[in-house]
Amino acid sequence: MRQIVLDTETTGLETSQGHRIIEIGCVELIGRRRTENHFHRYLQPDREIDTGAQEVHGISAEFLADKPRFEDVADEFLDYIRGAELIIHNAPFDTGFIRHELSLLGMPADTLDSLCTITDTLVLARKMHPAQKNSLDALCKRYQIDNSQRTLHGALLDAEILADVYLAMTGGQRALSLGGQEAGALAVAEAVRLIESDAPRPVVLTATDSELAAHAACLDRIDKASESNCVWLRQEREGATSSPH
């Protein structure tokens, strides 16, 4: 499976106000391992950057003055993401800006959706951790992902961090090494060794006679109240009927 972890930085928050993408950062995962096939571009937006946005990402109009425009990299970007699953935190924001940029080039509204599937890690995190903070920083803290270099937002850095977070959230390898199968096998063997040596032995508790009697009495009450439709007793009766004599 090919997955692309994607993030963008923009001149502001709303495409309806003419805001544009100024940075795209993408990290490729193949079989849940990072490759070196990144996509990273700074873009000239041909407009001012909101003060609040610049305080978040630190990218200035002067820095972007000699950078290509989205139209210059659009074909390369679409070829890069073609056929992949996009992994994005708060996907409607980033995909909304990408669709807006594509629309400015006269491309159909469904261009992005026709090329990719999209997974929103914010939606995933809210399902896994309801009523908790699920920002990227909060998830890094929860899953012990090092984001100490994230003093400012940056599309490629955030995509790299999100890749770590996504793999941790979905039960995968956190360290995005480029090691081969041998390294993976050694890591699994080490984990098994630690479990075998350190994990406490489970304690098996059996029910007492009084507990079994109370349980049987409870099932009897349920059976009477349900007109002999107690599932557990029905299974026992059917099992007794079908057993050989």
Image: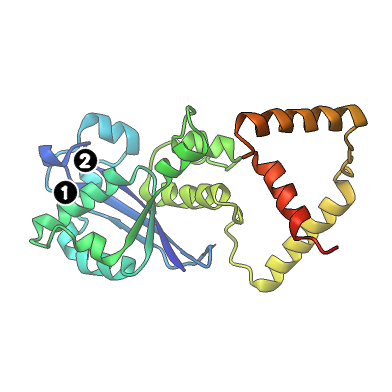
Query: Which type of secondary structure does the marked residue at label 2 adopt?
Result: loop
- Sequence-wise, which precedes: disc 2 or disc 1? 2
Q: Position of residue 14 (x, y in %)?
A: 18, 37
Q: Nearer the viewer, residue 63 or 45?
A: 45
From this viewpoint, is residue 66 visible? yes
| Relative to 181, 189 lies left or right | right
Q: Is residue 9 above or below residue 218?
A: below
Q: Residue at x 30, y 58 (%)?
A: 41
User: Residue tagged by mark 2?
Assistant: 11
Q: Is residue 114 above or below residue 164?
A: below
Q: Position of residue 202 (x, y in %)?
A: 87, 43
Q: Amino acid at mark 2?
A: Thr
Q: Position of residue 21 (x, y in %)?
A: 22, 48
The answer to whether marks 2 and 1 mark residues whose Cβ atoms lie closer than 8 Å is: yes
Q: Residue at x 24, y 60 (%)?
A: 112
Q: Is residue 39 above or below residue 16?
A: below
User: Residue tagged by mark 1?
Assistant: 45
From this viewpoint, is residue 150 visible? no
Q: Residue at x 60, y 62 (%)?
A: 177
Quarter occupied by residue 42: bottom left
Quadrant housing the C terminus? bottom right
| Relative to 166, 85 lies left or right | left
Q: Residue at x 88, y 42 (%)?
A: 200
Crowding at mark 2 (Cα within 10 Å: few <14, some 14-19, many 20+): many
Q: Position of residue 28 (x, y in %)?
A: 44, 63
